[in-house]
Image: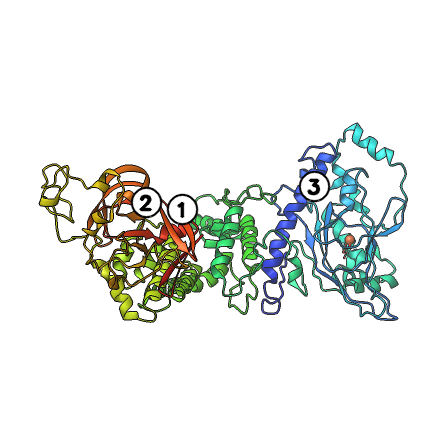
Amino acid sequence: MLYKLWPDESLLPSFRPTFESYLVQVEALSYEFASLMSEAFGLGPHGLDRFYDDMTGRTMQHRAKVVKYPAVKDGEEGQGVGPHYDAGFLTFLLQASPHRGLQVQNLAGEWIDAPPIPDTFVVNIGKALEFVTGGLARATSHRVVSPQAALGEEATPRYSVPFFQNIGLDVRLGEHVLEFPPEILALRDARGNVAKTDSVNFSEFDREPSGKVNLIGRVKSHPDVAQMHYPELFKQYFPDGLPESGKGSARLFDLILILIVRPVCNIEDAGYCVMLDQRIASEQYDGTNWLEFKTKIRAAAKQRGVLGYLDGTIPCPPSPAEVALAAAAAAALVQGTTKGSPTRPSTPTPSPTTFATAYWGLTTPTYDEWQQRDAWTQGLISLNVKNAIGLGIKLDGTAAETYASIASIKDAVSDLGCITAEAELNAIKYNDGSDMDEHVATLRTAWIKANGQGAGITDTKFRMVVLKSLPPTWLPFIGSLYAEPTSTGVIARISAHSKMILSIVPGAGASLKALSTSTSNSKLRNPHLKCTNCSKPGHELATCFQKGGGKEGQFPEWWRGKKVGSAAQTTASATTTHVAASAIASTNEDSFYAFSTQHATSVTARNADGSLKTFGDSAASDHYFAARADFHDYVEEARMGETATGEKFRILGRGTVRKVSVVNGKRINISFMNVLHAPDFTHNLVSIGRLDRGGYTVQFGGGKLRVQP
Ligand SMILES: O=C(O)CCC(=O)C(=O)O
Ligand SMILES: [Fe+2]
């Protein structure tokens, strides 16, 4: 009879999935380890397979327990485990607390300590493996002495979690002879005679099936229990009644433990089992980090091939008992209706298990396999959850039910949260005159928040959000930002622009608006004119230099690259009061600043010497100079440019412009590279964005624009 007694979930939250998952993995490890040992014995990787039943696991008798060794109080006799062998092939012992206590007997017969080493198992060789290998692998004689307190300290209990890998219940080791290569046997012989050990148990392997040997082992270890439940066997091994030491030995297991065929046990702290690959995140799910948890859990499940268990798309196949019942019912029905010959209920042939397989996604599971994988998957969830009970997570069903108990609420909540957060982000608007840095910070915070909720707003999208957050008064400026592909670029430009505006009209929101809308007027001298000859704005047929124009071929002096005389320039209109949202920078003012700013509407576009004024323009994508004479390294490049408001102007070439600024009596040479030649402009424009990208610091303040390398 197979008992599965689990402690109440509410008393030990997560214990069952934790432990089941632990067992699945330690069992897989045990097969892997046995296979490696088999190779080391010269038997190939499958040399020991025959002892594991038919590999269906149906009559396997692996066991595990969680053991608490109470601390020894002063003057008390300790409870430990006397010298013994383990019964099966291999034991994987997890020493779950830092206490010493485990001891093993070496070949000389001396007892030596096997203290706990973090993240390791102690692997014992069991008596059955010694038997089938003819002593090649020696069974590990071991014992446990009770934990003693260090001087002056209070003793604490020792915990251990052994997993005993056993062999098929029906296997009689006496019937199996393994053929070892001579060089392997030579190794054993070279060891010579070894000391006798203090352990004596499990000597019946030569005659009894292994299940019975195990039972005898239990009877010998716990005579008082055997007397009660196996009186026949008890009499056979204890003809003189209960031995003195036998009474004591029951106390050895006055520990929190239950032993059954598929192992289950009790534990004080399920956290001890948390050590294998199911702990995927350093931070566990605590009810707030759903997205991170979900992503990691799903990735881990996918890697292991158990996503179907998480999502519930792999249904549990009927148990062998259910299949048998259904078959019997069907047979009865056939008998009843057709009166034909009785049909034997068919027992399903279990497919070989894949206990040691790391990837579980490919097979159609048997009932047992399904149970194991489901338990593993549930462990995956529960091991990564901080307080499953507190969070209302269902742990008493399938893994899919457990997952759904979190996901159904969390996904809905986070979808909602994501929509809300995105809406909040889109609702943030900039008010003219307010602090742009603050506005940008608010946007960024909302962006991070929305993405934290899973909104997945890319930088490209965020760039648009930033632009959309600006009021309509900024539209002309926004037009100049299309060349900025990143949100950072856009933010740098709008920040610089807003600082400039504020510095020109300190604290005046309304004026700012006026200033930024003043771009509705053009940089062209005569924007209202449009040439019927060359179709370009800014001049008429009568003044057109192009073929067919009134001034065909009569290009001014500067057009041919000659030095521009002030006379030539004075013809330019000085009535321009409508420049782009720009600061004004004079290149020939004797000031500390390379450029000084002035309100666009209060100045003419000319310096005292008649040369064109230069404007620092945070909206301009390029530097524009109007006078050909200012250019060096000039390359012709005839095309049309366009202002933010859509007006066209001519670009005739590109080159380097050198200007001299006098700062504190010192002449400073400034070179503007890649400047576009725009002859229709009434003033020069220096692009703040380009200065910024060129590594210059551009500062506005005190009515001036300061450019520093
Ligand atoms: O608790 C331990 O460290 C070992 C226990 C043990 O050897 C056993 O139960 O067989
Ligand atoms: Fe043991």
Q: Position of residue 497 (x, y in %)?
A: 34, 60
Mark 1 nearby-residue class (10 Å; few <14, some 14–19, many ≥20): few
Quarter of the picture holding the N terminus: bottom right
Given contact means CB atoms under 8 Å apart, are the residues at marks 1 and 3 in contact?
no
Secondary structure type for disc 1 = helix
Q: Quadrant of residue 279?
A: bottom right
Question: Is 510 on the left or on the right of 706, as rendered?
Answer: left
Q: Amino acid at mark 3?
A: Ala
* Front label number (1 vs 3): 3
Q: Nearer the viewer, residue 341 or 32?
A: 32
- The reply, left or right, for residue 328 in relation to residue 79 is left
Under tag 3, what secondary structure?
Answer: helix
Q: What mark, if any, has residue 460 been given in the picture?
A: none
Between discs 2 and 1, the one toward the N terminus: 1
Residue type marked 2: Val
Residue matched to label 3 = 34
- Residue sitting at 11 percent across and 47 percent down? 540
Residue at (26, 46) in percent of width and height: 627
Q: Which residue is mark 1?
A: 338
The vertical placement of 265 against 169, above or below, is below
